[in-house]
Amino acid sequence: MAVQRFIIEMGMGVDQRGSDYTKAACRAVKDALSHSSIALFDALGLDAADMQVKVTIGVSDPTAVDQSALKALIPYGQVTIDLRSGGLSPRSGAVIASAAVEAFLDPAIVQAKLS
């Protein structure tokens, strides 16, 4: 059976002066992570390493983002990064990034713990 998404959080990050796409993207991921607390693992005795995490970032120049910096922010699971064109880069030199952080689990793993 395919994995199923069990959480999604959104975030926004800004680098106001440096035009640093990675900094804005990291701030967006941190913002998204600050909105969630996953009690499921402790409650069911699951291993957070079994989680698959997909981080989608929208910035106006996706090639300017350091993916390894984003992966370093995710404390658990197998992380994939999807960089897309989006966000904003106003003429002021600011960079605005948006992030979606999704977590997936294989339902068979959850079912095995519940059995």
Image: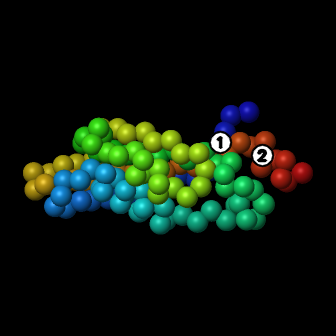
| Residue 40 position in % (x across, y down) | 70, 61
| Residue 80 position in % (x across, y down) | 50, 41
Task: Look at the numbered discs 2 and 1 and tell me whether their residues touch, using CB distance below 8 Å.
Answer: no
**Mark 2 element type:** helix
In the picture of the structure, the residue carrying the numbered disc 2 is 109
Residue at 40%, 45% (x, y): give it: 67
73 on left or right of 19: right
Residue at 16%, 61% (x, y): give it: 17
Q: Residues within 10 Å of mark 2 (few under 14, many from 20)?
A: few
Mark 2 or 1, which is nearer the eye? Answer: 2
54 on left or right of 99: right
Badge 1 amino acid:
Gln
CA–CA distance in space, label 2 to label 1: 11 Å
93 on left or right of 68: left
Q: Residues within 10 Å of mark 1 (few under 14, many from 20)?
A: few
Figure quadrant of residue 108? top right
Badge 2 amino acid:
Ile
26 on left or right of 49: left
Q: Please indicate, yes or no, whether residue 23 appears anywhere in the rendered image.
A: yes
Residue most extreme to the left:
91
Of the image marks 2 and 1, the number of the one nearer the N terminus: 1
Residue most extreme to the right:
115
Identify the coloring.
Answer: rainbow
| Residue 86 position in % (x across, y down) | 29, 42
Residue at 29%, 38% (x, y): give it: 63
| Residue 43 position in % (x across, y down) | 75, 65
In the picture of the structure, the residue carrying the numbered disc 1 is 4
- Asked if residue 35 is positioned above or below residue 64 in the image, the reply reads below
Q: Please indicate, yes or no, whether residue 9 appears anywhere in the rendered image.
A: no
**Mark 1 element type:** strand
